[in-house]
Image (cartoon, grey):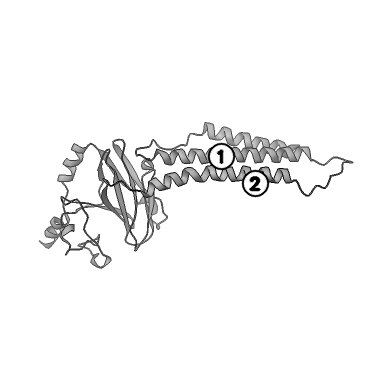
Amino acid sequence: MAVALALVLIAVGSVVFHLLSPWWWTPIASNWQYIDQTIVITFWITGVVFVAVVLFMAYCVFRFRHRHGAKAAYEPENKRLEWWLTVATAVGVAAMLAPGLFVWNQFVTVPRDAVEIEVVGRQWQWSYRLPGEDGKLGTSDIRHIGLDNPLGLNPHDAAGQDDVVIEAEDLHLPIGKPVKVLLRSIDVLHDFYVPEFRAKMDMVPGSVTYFWFTPTRTGTFEVLCAELCGVGHAVMRGRVVVQSETEHAVWLNRQRTFAQLALAQAR
């Protein structure tokens, strides 16, 4: 009896804890509300199953508890129950997979009008590169990485001369414009994550990964590394500032291009 009561309290307590919990998502600041909706659907399905299983266990413990003189009836098969469980499990799995596949299709399908920017991670700092007046990013290579060229931009690529390079400073983005974020890591695994944007992706050395999003509200949002990248992992932070197009244009005009930085270092 005590065990059955404990199981019931676990089920009820879990639901109450969730409803009264002070921890929840930060207010969303991108177009990825579909991710939130998918998580909610998955939570409700798994939550209902969890409560049902625990309460069923409590029922079994109570119903089939030891009683003096009682004898168990051996029934090794129950075809009806097996079919019911098979169908219910298949429906539940499909209900959890379908929303995720729908969101993933959107996640990997970048809008044609998205502006490409680059985020470079290294222990323990974020750097950024934005396209210049030509609207496209130049090439890069690890062979070009050095003290005077930490992002490894190709100095012989004319398309990269007007790229805007931002090191150890805030990244500014205009509101309402889709952005494709190209991700590179110079040393170890990193993960560029802004909780309010929801979308994120690992940064793998030797590869260029990506994700996209559209900022939907202005503000300053903290950047975290969501991959354990070393002893300084906790301090690998940055900020993304989402602002109006006018404010963003003013900020962008104050930044220096790769060619300007190279000229300043040559002097």
Does residue 82 show up?
A: yes
Residue farthest toward the right in the current orientation of the protein: 69
The residue where tag 1 is placed is 45
Q: Is residue 129 left or right of residue 42?
A: left
Question: Residue 124 occupies which quadrant of the picture?
Answer: bottom left
Q: Residue at x 16, y 52 (%)?
A: 134
Position of residue 55 measured from the top left corner of the image (x, y, whole percent): 67, 37
Position of residue 264 measured from the top left corner of the image (x, y, whole percent): 12, 58
Q: Dot 1 lies on which element?
A: helix
Q: Residue at x 63, y 37 (%)?
A: 11
Please tell me the numbered disc located at residue 86: 2
Q: Is residue 70 left or right of residue 208?
A: right
Q: Dot 1: within a 10 Å radius of its alpha carbon, few (fewer than 14), some, or many (20 or more) residues? A: some
Q: Quadrant of the C terminus?
A: bottom left
Position of residue 144 measured from the top left corner of the image (x, y, whole percent): 23, 66
Residue closest to the eye, 18 or 46: 46
Q: Quadrant of the N terminus?
A: top right
Query: What amino acid type should be assigned to the residue bearing mark 1?
Result: Ile
Tag 1 or tag 2, which sits nearer the N-term? 1
Q: Residue at x 68, y 45 (%)?
A: 83
Query: What amino acid type should be assigned to the residue bearing mark 2?
Result: Thr
